[in-house]
Image: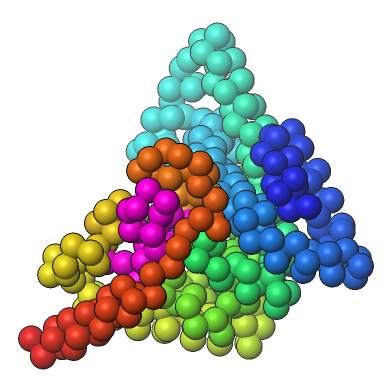
Amino acid sequence: DAEYLGDIYQIADQRLRVAALVRHLWAAPVHRAAFRTIVADVRAFVTFANGLLNETNKLVAGAMEHLPEIRNHQVRTGQIEATTDEFRRLREEYEGANETRKEELDSRHADHEQHLKQELELCTEILGLVELQTGDAAVSKAFMGQELRSRLAGMLLSVVRQFTGKRSLDIKISSPEQYGFDPKDILSRVGRIATHFSNEPEFPGALAESGYYDAELLPRCAQTLRRLGALSTKQLDALDALATQASTAREALSLDDGLENEAPEEFVDPLTAELMTAPVKLPSGHVVDDSTIRQHLLNELSDPFSRQPLEPADVVPLPELRARLKHFSTTASQSSWVR
């Protein structure tokens, strides 16, 4: 099942094989039906999907650390022209180094190459797997659950930021194909994944709330993909619409900034100090936002206050408090418009 698959996925040596296996099983209609059944087991699916998203973030971050190092060594050895003072200094230092120092730099370069190849291969496989799964209506709905949608939004924005932002200047290397490095492919996969959620009403808000959000990111991604001819016109239109919706959601969020300072204590999550939207009661008696405790339970099945064992089913919704909180938020927001 998905929980077992999630446990296996944590074993480093097995990650690539498991990703390839899941992709193979997904291609068979009988197995795809089984995946839809697994989705009904929320905890198991969230564990598996959360592992995919976290792994993607880790792999992309790792690749972005290795790429500048590989570029620098290619400058040292003349594979890339030394066009700046910094590059010329690297070239001169290498040419003037003794054999021991050159061997040390060459060996370090070989390590960066090996790690980059492994990380890019696995990253491409995982993104392909996420793209396949989120293209299915049942699975994409599961990704829009409270436990996953913010993680998905953060992963997508993080990758776009890495591959279209200022740091993207550091990823230009000679012969990228020998490392399996294809920025166009990675960005295209991310763009297609995002379009799978362009009609999901809660996804723009998840993007807007992400710490990686920047109003320019999604438009820049769409512009890059349009220039590369990597997505269809329909997909690009969907990405444009998603960017607009996220921007609108961000503006709405800015109106709510500081509401927690005006709110009664019972409306504020004690763990995050943020205004709650879906308050729930824990066995310890404490009240937190549903998204907060679900995020905590991804890492540890315990009550964060008492440290006693806690299962998702032990969490009790508080509809009356939620209604009062919604009324407060609506009234406060309308007041901010007047001010």
The magenta stretch spans which residues? 275-294
The residue under the point 64% across, 34% down is 115
Horizontal side of 208 relative to 177 (left or right) equals left
* Residue 133 position in % (x across, y down): 72, 66
The image quarter in which residue 207 lies:
bottom left
The residue under the point 62% across, 27% down is 111
Magenta-colored stretch includes residue 261: no
* Residue 269 position in % (x across, y down): 29, 59
Q: Is residue 229 above or below residue 154?
A: below
- Viewer-nearest residue: 265 or 75: 265
Horizontal side of 221 relative to 189 (left or right) equals left
Q: Quadrant of the C terminus?
A: bottom left
For the question of whether residue 15 can be seen, the reply is no
| Colouring rule applied to residues | rainbow
The image quarter in which residue 188 lies:
bottom right
The residue under the point 59% across, 28% down is 109
- Viewer-nearest residue: 190 or 65: 190
The image quarter in which residue 45 lies:
bottom right
* Residue 28 position in % (x across, y down): 91, 66
For the question of whether residue 33 can be seen, the reply is yes
